[in-house]
Image (cartoon, grey):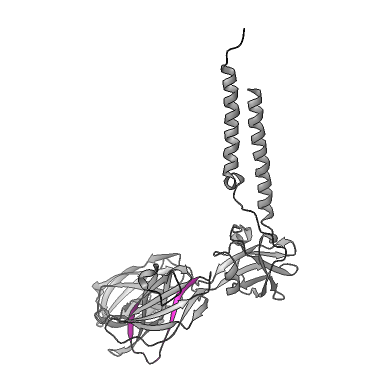
Amino acid sequence: MKRALQAVGLVLVAQGALARAAWAQESQAKSPAALEFQRGVELAPGAAQQFLVVDAALWGHARGDLGDVRLYSGETEVPYVLQTGGGATVREQVDCKVLQPATVAGNTQFILDMTQTEMYNRVHLDLKTKDFVARARIEGANDVHARAWALLGSSSLFDFTSENLGHNSTLQMPDSTFRYLRVTLDGPAKRTEILGAKTEVGQDEASRWVTVAEHPAITQEGRDTVLRFNTPNSVPVERVHFDIDGAQGNFLRSVEVQMLEEDDPKQEQMEREVRFAGNGTITRIHMLRGGKRIDQEDANVFLFEQEHGALKIMVHNGDDQALKIANAQLQQLERRIYFRTPPGPATLFYGNQRMGAPNYDYAKLAQIDPGAGTARLLAETVNTAYRIPRDPRPWTERHPAAMWAALIAAIVVLGAVALRSLRPVAE
């Protein structure tokens, strides 16, 4: 039995040594030598914080989530935070209580209680009224019984359901902090048809979009206008933006986006794997109705996922003439890498699909400086110090046969000892 325990102990010691060696190799793999590509960074002078814009070359060789990107100044790793330029983040929608709905001089008037939010610039009304056009006069005050109300502006509200041109029931105004809003509608909406109101808690900031590809192949397939794109490999796409001919009249068209397995548009549709990637509507409404001007345009369709590859975009024209599409672009939200300015030159490294994303305190605590300097990425080169990293999986997962062999050997030894102990002892 003593020999059996010694054998098992030797097996465990050997496994421990191999595991420690694998851990050391994994730790070494986190250095720049584990990253295949590098780019110099031209820093902006005099800025305490800087940012880099992620470009197509970086997408081409980095991980899809940019988790393998590392920034170094000499041998020191520089922490960073990756920010997506998605504009305002709406934290929640807040109900605004509708107070004192009434009819005043033939118009519908009501007060909105805005005390649940500190700042706002739009309110979404829930109206029961259909097929109408109205002008909404918006005033603000901090006392619901105030005699003088500040004029904040006016908004056009409409519903063109019967004409398939959509609706708009959003009040827009400058950033405001009034505790109450007084809204006067000069259209057919009755006080009993004001069902509710909501506002969004958040701060508006313009989204930053980058064009990934444009000038698609445009064809007609039956009643549909079809656009086909082949996007650069590994570059995510988040929306389609349409350039519609200025001579095009009012329209509202549904759009469907498919991702195709192959990038050969001549291949038969039945032979290709098709995945639904997104849908939406594009619209243009410019009209004078009842003495009121309506102007609304939306030329963007958002994708459900960050798609890349061959995309087929179908604009469903229905029974109308084909939409006059001058061009279209595939776009993505701009990504920025913010970091504290290092004391010396900096280099960006990337190119390891197995490397895990970093975990920096800087990413959790850093405040984005509106005056951050714009650093510039230089040309991509191969990292001459690059060494192909070993598989980062645990040794037992990479060598299951050796693990099983060690266990079987231990079982055989224990079995042999057990058999010897069962033999009769000679007298």
For this orientation, the residue located farthest to the bottom is 247
Give yes or no for residue 332 being in the magenta stretch.
no
Is 5 drawn above or below residue 255 in the view shown? above
Residue 236 percent location from the top left of the image: 51, 70
For this orientation, the residue located farthest to the front is 426
Residue range of the region highlighted in magenta in the rendering: 234-254
Q: Quadrant of residue 14?
A: top right
Left or right: where 177 falls relative to 75: left
Residue 392 percent location from the top left of the image: 61, 52
Is residue 74 visible to us here?
yes
Front-most of 265 and 361? 265
Front-most of 359 and 102? 359
Q: How many marks?
A: 0
Residue 102 percent location from the top left of the image: 26, 75
Residue 22 percent location from the top left of the image: 66, 48
Front-most of 7 and 358? 7
Q: Residue at x 68, y 51 (%)?
A: 25
The quarter of the picture where the C terminus appears is: top right
Q: Quadrant of residue 135?
A: bottom left
Left or right: where 151 falls relative to 357: left
Is residue 55 visible to us here?
no
The quarter of the picture where the N terminus appears is: top right
Q: Residue at x 63, y 26 (%)?
A: 4
Front-most of 369 and 420? 420
Left or right: where 280 falls relative to 357: left
Give yes or no for residue 253 being in the magenta stretch.
yes
Q: Quadrant of residue 289?
A: bottom left
